[in-house]
Amino acid sequence: MKKKVVLGLMVGTLTLGIGTGALAATGLEPIKAYLNSKITLKLNGETVTAKDANGKAVLPITYNGTTYLPVRAVGTLLGTEISYDGATSSVLIGGTNGSTPVTNNKLTLSSLGTSVLGSTAWHTKDPAETSYKGKDYKDVYLHNDPSTQGSDIQINTGKKYSSLHVELAALKGNQKIQVVDQDRTVLKTVNITPEDGLISLDVDVKGTEAVYVEIVAEDPGSALFVPLTTSYLTN
């Protein structure tokens, strides 16, 4: 029989010393389940890895013939916001108003990782550096030292993707950003300032082998923030 795969919320608890009545009051029920390391996740044909909020790989759980996937990790892979409302014990998929649909043709740069990201000098998962305006993006490109980091990031598209959605924020200083392909053809140019907040660029990348997001001009002491969990490629 073909097993079902369900998006399940993984909730763990320490049961030692907790009575049956106390567990019932929390809505938790002890079960015997198995971490399943043999299951490979593929999104639109690409092998991907589900990761927790700290960037650590997480495994599916198999229970009674059904395989459960951690909903937050899957949401990150799909480029969909996942949050938890403790007051109502509710998992919120796509924000609080339901206006953001789950679209399975979007692959976040964070989930694709080194299969598309050709740059490492800007990459950070340091919690001290991954937040912008109170939101922790977990996995980002941060450019704040041109002398050691260079001036661009490379995204290997391999002629497999139709568009790139990249989010940018100027943390400090005014900056001119352009996106070019492997032949140095300019695909998009934008000027950003810290007052602009987090902006989005949508770029047609059909037929490209690689694209480069470049800082072509910047004020001294500038810093650029690129969240990889909300920037994505579309098939």
Image (cartoon, rainbow, N blue to C red):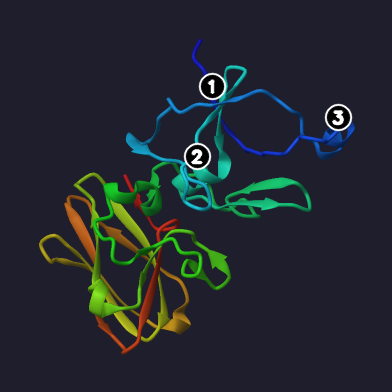
Tell me the residue that label 1 is attached to.
Answer: 4
For marks 3 and 2, give the CA distance.
Answer: 29 Å
Between 128 and 153, the one lying in front of the other is: 128
Between 23 and 219, the one lying in front of the other is: 23
| Residue depicted at x 47% and y 45% | 51
The quadrant where residue 77 appears? top left
Q: Residue furthest bottom?
A: 220
| Residue depicted at x 51% and y 68% | 131
For marks 1 and 3, give the CA distance.
Answer: 30 Å
Q: Earlier in the sequence, mark 1 or mark 2?
A: 1
Q: Nearer the viewer, mark 1 or mark 2?
A: 2
Residue 206 in view, yes or no:
yes
- Amino acid type at mark 3: Thr
| 232 relative to 145, above or below | above
Q: Nearer the viewer, mark 1 or mark 3?
A: 3
- Amino acid type at mark 2: Val
Q: Residue furthest right?
A: 21
Tell me the residue that label 2 is attached to.
Answer: 58
| 97 relative to 43, above or below | below
Image side of residue 212 versus residue 183, left or right = right
| Residue depicted at x 44% and y 57% | 230
Image side of residue 95 versus residue 182, left or right = right
- Looking at the rendered structure, the secondary structure element under dot 2 is loop
- Amino acid type at mark 1: Lys
Classify 10 Å Cα crowding around label 2: few (below 14), some (14-19), many (20 and above).
some
Residue 20's tag is 3
